Amino acid sequence: MAERVIIIGSGPAGWSAAIYAARASLEPLVIEGEMTQENWDLGRPPLGQLAITTEVENYPGFPSGDLSAYLENALPAERRQMMAPHQKHGVSGPELMELIRQQAVNFGTRTLMEDVTEVDFSKRPFKLKTSGGATYEAESIIIATGARANYLGLESEKRFKNMGVSACAVCDGALPRFRDRPLVVIGGGDTAMEESDYLAKFGSKVYIVHRRDSFRASKVMAERAINNPKIEVKWNSVVDEVLGTDASGVTGVRIRGTDDAGKTEELEVAGYFAAIGHTPNTEFLKGQLEMNSKGYLKWTVPFRTNTSVEGVFAAGDVADDNYRQAITAAGSGCMAALDCERWLSLQGVH
């Protein structure tokens, strides 16, 4: 028999959808994704982007404190054994995701640690194929596969991720390691301008490194950054290397000019923020759902999570090219589950 609802993806959106779907007695199946090196390298691991994040200071309900006893009591021993030791000053990304996952499992959510490789949304029940070679059918689908941050591809970026390298100023900019320290932002679009302006509230100085002699950002956003006395633009420059140590994390960047025979310069910074966009994880869909100009799934009904195929819903960063926060992803996961439950009821599926 076909599943009533399959949720593809296992970040805040996917697990929040699972909590609501499970409490509605829909017995959801969450296809989490495979725990492979490829998925980690591509920035799409099981449990989502928070699985590769350290401190989480802006998720409601987790002020700074020692959560050791709670984690030991709330999570199964086999899951705790795979996690890094608790740092006793708040919740980490992996800890938060394990707790949300466990909450969904407690209500009866079933899980499958495979990747979805192919879908057929041409008729109901919908069909999915997984990396394990199995085929699943479902009356409804919630897609919550997220979006991965784009980086330059430097080995030094990988080395210092969560040690000063970030792709989200709003997520990480207020952390103690960045306060009153010089920072660098890579990019030239509106996102880079917004992130630079935001970081200037915390850092002592913010460099913007851009490969051209003008920004592609909107004029008002570009002028705001250029006129900020704490922001300095390094025009016609690219990053050659992120500098740092295992003990201190990021300590600087080496940049190279694009218009003067490759002259190099080292900037002393404590944080490196990539602001060169995100890529939604939609390759497996092979164009079966309508997307916007950036490749994100399009919500086709105002204030609802419906996609262009009736019975298929989208939640989280895979459909959100604006906020991209854990809390907004979780909220849209709730919305998708409620939309899905109501739609199933109208189809006579209970």
Image: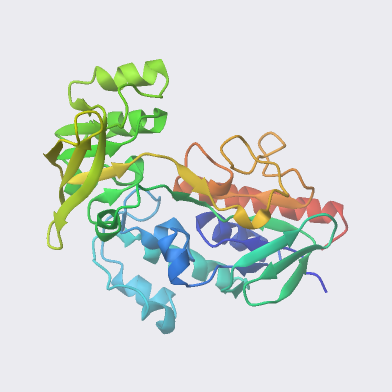
Q: Is residue 80 left or right of residue 20?
A: left
Q: Most extreme residue toward the front, as rendered?
A: 261
Number of numbered tags placed on the structure image: 0
User: Is residue 99 in view?
Assistant: no
Q: Quadrant of the N terminus?
A: bottom right
Q: Quadrant of the C terminus?
A: bottom right
User: Which residue appears at 60% of the width and 74% of the height?
Assistant: 112
Q: Is residue 75 above or below residue 273?
A: below
Expressed as whole percent of the image width and height from the top left, the position of residue 332 reads 58, 47
User: Is residue 55 in view?
Assistant: yes
Q: Is residue 221 left or right of residue 23?
A: left
Q: Is residue 178 left or right of residue 103?
A: left
Where, by quadrant of the figure, is residue 43 drawn? bottom left
Q: Is residue 309 above or below residue 202?
A: below
User: Which residue appears at 28% of the width and 53% of the height?
Assistant: 157
Q: Nearer the viewer, residue 157 or 269?
A: 157
Expressed as whole percent of the image width and height from the top left, the position of residue 30 reads 62, 67
How was the colour assigned to the protein in this rendering? rainbow
Q: Nearer the viewer, residue 225 or 15?
A: 225
Expressed as whole percent of the image width and height from the top left, the position of residue 94 reads 38, 65
User: Which residue appears at 32% of the width and 41% of the height?
Assistant: 169
Q: Is residue 313 above or below residue 51?
A: above
Q: Is residue 127 left or right of residue 145?
A: right
Q: Most extreme residue toward the right, as rendered?
A: 348
Q: Most extreme residue toward the bottom, as rendered?
A: 78
Expressed as whole percent of the image width and height from the top left, the position of residue 195 reads 33, 34
Q: Nearer the viewer, residue 238 or 91?
A: 238
